[in-house]
Image (spheres, rainbow, N blue to C red):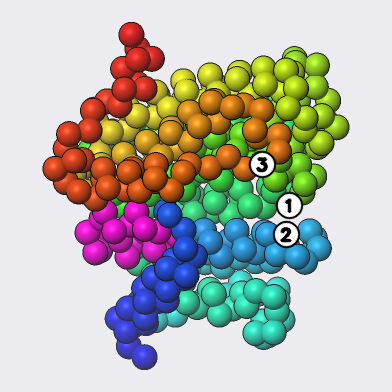
């Protein structure tokens, strides 16, 4: 197969992986022109398979070994001067992974050509892709955080690094406000953590830092078997205030974005920010269930961004930002 055909086929495969995910994130790619939409599919497919390796049912030691191999293979393909028609694979695994729970060789051959083309075309620093793998590796090794600084670093790996890679695809005017870009990812991930408290408890995971929940008289058992009492409510309300500040900082990215990226950034920011408000309406709910936006709210947000006349009438900056600065 010619090198151009290999890259084209790889883009076809990453589009299929992204489409089959059923993610709302994938649907938002249609706000972008075709070339950038394809690049987002390459990035998403890479992150999706990375997550799948970390979430599979194999023992943690084996998942860690596979992720180390995936990271090394990613580095080989993105850092070295690799010919377009070649997908180098890191040594250290069996000769054939086709009967494994996750076929690592097949996924690498499917995804790496498109990912390599995307990173070169949009000048995405390789370290962001490696940090995405590092975030999933961290999940295999650490299920508790003592301090907020430790949580910040984890959130940077699993959320901000992804966001920074996205910003290169969407394109921006330099210099990019890095603090704001990182804060935006932190805001999104902190919102996810609050939403998923009950689900994470079932998996034996606590993402909120001990430094914070201990201040409210809570211990690990109170987070592993969460009860909707006043102590938990006070903790959630503290984290909501912290997230709101991060959202205000994160919106500063808007001024650097080009016209292609603004609709997608706006839709993601407003969706996550609306979810935070939904959690704030009833902080006790996170103890028993995953809090989500209603279908009507999701459809409303989608229509606001896919219909250009409505999009151009959205307040910029959003009301939540102007109210915070009042």
Q: Position of residue 101 (x, y in %)?
A: 69, 75
The tag on residue 64 is 2
Residue displayed at 55% across by 31% down: 279
Residue displayed at 47% across by 77% down: 110
Residue carrying label 1 = 140
Q: Which of 269 and 11 is in front in this view?
A: 269
Label 3 environment density (alpha carbons within 10 Å; few <14, some 14–19, many ≥20): few
* Residue that extends furthest to the left in the rendered view of this protein: 309
Q: Position of residue 291 (x, y in %)?
A: 58, 39
Label 1 environment density (alpha carbons within 10 Å; few <14, some 14–19, many ≥20): some
Label 2 environment density (alpha carbons within 10 Å; few <14, some 14–19, many ≥20): many
Residue carrying label 3 = 289
| Highlighted magenta segment, given as a residue range | 26-45
Q: In this view, does 266 lie to the left or right of 128?
A: left
Secondary structure, mark 3, is loop
Q: In this view, does 49 lie to the left or right of 300?
A: right
- If you read the primary sequence from the N terminus, does the residue marked by circle 2 or circle 1 appear first? 2
Q: How far apart are marks 3 and 2 (CA)?
A: 30 Å
- The image quarter containing residue 16 is bottom left
Residue displayed at 39% across by 63% down: 41
């Amino acid at each position: 197969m010619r090198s151009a055909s290999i890259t084209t086929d790889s883009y076809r495969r990453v589009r299929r992986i992204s489409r089959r995910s059923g993610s709302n994130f994938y649907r938002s790619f249609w706000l972008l022109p075709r070339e950038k939409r394809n690049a987002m599919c390459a990035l998403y497919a890479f992150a999706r398979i990375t997550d799948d390796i970390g979430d599979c049912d194999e023992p943690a030691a084996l998942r860690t070994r596979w992720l180390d191999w995936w990271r090394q293979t990613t580095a080989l393909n993105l850092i070295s001067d690799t010919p377009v028609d070649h997908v180098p694979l890191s040594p250290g695994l069996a000769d054939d992974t086709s009967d494994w729970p996750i076929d690592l060789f097949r996924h690498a051959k499917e995804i790496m050509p498109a990912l390599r083309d995307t990173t070169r075309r949009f000048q995405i620093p390789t370290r962001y892709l490696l940090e995405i793998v590092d975030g999933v590796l961290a999940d295999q090794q650490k299920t508790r955080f003592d301090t907020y600084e430790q949580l910040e670093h984890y959130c940077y790996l699993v959320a901000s690094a992804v966001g920074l890679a996205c910003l290169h695809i969407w394109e921006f005017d330099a210099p990019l406000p890095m603090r704001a870009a990182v804060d935006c990812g932190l805001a999104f991930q902190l919102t996810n953590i609050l939403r998923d408290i009950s689900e994470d408890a079932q998996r034996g995971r606590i993402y909120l830092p001990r430094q914070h929940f201990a201040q409210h008289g809570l211990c690990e058992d109170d987070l592993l078997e969460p009860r909707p009492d006043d102590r938990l409510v006070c903790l959630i309300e503290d984290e909501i205030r912290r997230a709101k500040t991060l959202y205000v900082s994160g919106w500063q990215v808007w001024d650097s974005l080009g016209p292609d990226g603004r609709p997608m950034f706006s839709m993601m920011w407003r969706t996550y920010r609306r979810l935070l408000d939904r959690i704030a309406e009833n902080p006790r709910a996170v103890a028993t269930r995953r809090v989500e936006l209603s279908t009507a709210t999701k459809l409303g947000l989608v229509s606001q961004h896919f219909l250009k006349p409505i999009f151009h009438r959205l307040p910029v900056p959003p009301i939540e930002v102007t109210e915070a600065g009042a």
